[in-house]
Amino acid sequence: MTEIREYRREELARLAGITVRTLRFYRERKLIPPPRREGRIAWYDDHHLARLRTIAALLERGHTLTGIAELAEALDHGRDVADVLGVTPTEEEPVRLTPEELAARFEGQVTPDNLAAALDLGYLGTDGDEIVHISRRLLDVSSALVREGIPLAEVLAAGRRVREHVDALADMFADLVLRHTEEEDAVQRLRPLARSVVEAELSLALDRRLRRDGEHGEGPQRGQRPEGSGGPEGPSGSGAF
């Protein structure tokens, strides 16, 4: 088991790239959990350092301290990630991991920027010393893509694009159902049909893509983007942290 290092206040601030005054301010705003106390000495650990680096990355992405504080307070008090994010009941199974387990899954690519991106997308939250991923399936897919050599940052970027497309599909399906039924639970009851349509269409789309690649050679080489991959026709890959 990996030993968690501990730091005095000044050392933690230096490693996080902030001042001691800023660290005190974050503590007062409850952006970080309280330190372990040994007499008059406050000891912080790697979890505090990771939280501070995540705060910095979220601030760079335009999040406010108020919003970050609300998220941190809710998660530190053990609320379910889906509740914090305002997500309705789902078929997806959340997964709890330690920071070390998360780092091992993604081969050292859990940087502050990637962690902030995952939080921004709603994939990750924290509950005490644990990290909670909102979907076991997405966690398994994204870690498999990283093992295949795809950088985690690109997996997250693809996940953001996929999110945009599936949100549009969900709206289209819900609008279709609600136009033709008065049942309050119709969308929930018929969601397996929507999932089947998306899975079938994606499978057929991949078949078409593979046929095109076969007709024109072996397709793009490793490290190259296929022509038109950034166009409006849809994502060329998927996955989510």
Image (cartoon, rainbow, N blue to C red):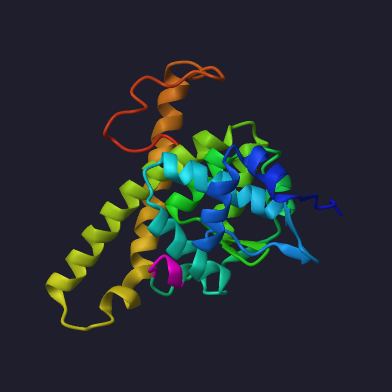
Q: Is residue 239 visible?
A: no
| Residue 102 placement (x, y as % from top left) | 68, 51
| Residue 186 placement (x, y as % from top left) | 26, 78
| Residue 172 placement (x, y as % from top left) | 22, 58
Q: Nearer the viewer, residue 57 or 97?
A: 57
Q: Main secondary structure of the magenta part?
A: loop
Q: Nearer the viewer, residue 6 or 141?
A: 6
Q: Nearer the viewer, residue 66 or 225?
A: 66
> In the figure, residue 216 lies in which quadrant?
top left
Residue pictured at 59% horizontal, 52% vertical:
51
Residue pictured at 40% horizontal, 44% vertical:
160
59 horizontally vs 164: left or right: right
Residue pictured at 74% horizontal, 64% vertical:
36
Residue pictured at 72% horizontal, 42% vertical:
11
169 horizontally vs 22: left or right: left
Task: Name the image quarter holding the N terminus.
Answer: bottom right
Residue found at the very far front of the displayed protein: 40
Q: Magenta stretch: residue 26 in it? A: no
Q: Is residue 23 visible?
A: yes
Residue 53 lies, with reference to residue 153, above or below; the image says below
Span of residues in magenta? 83-87
Q: Magenta stretch: residue 86 in it? A: yes
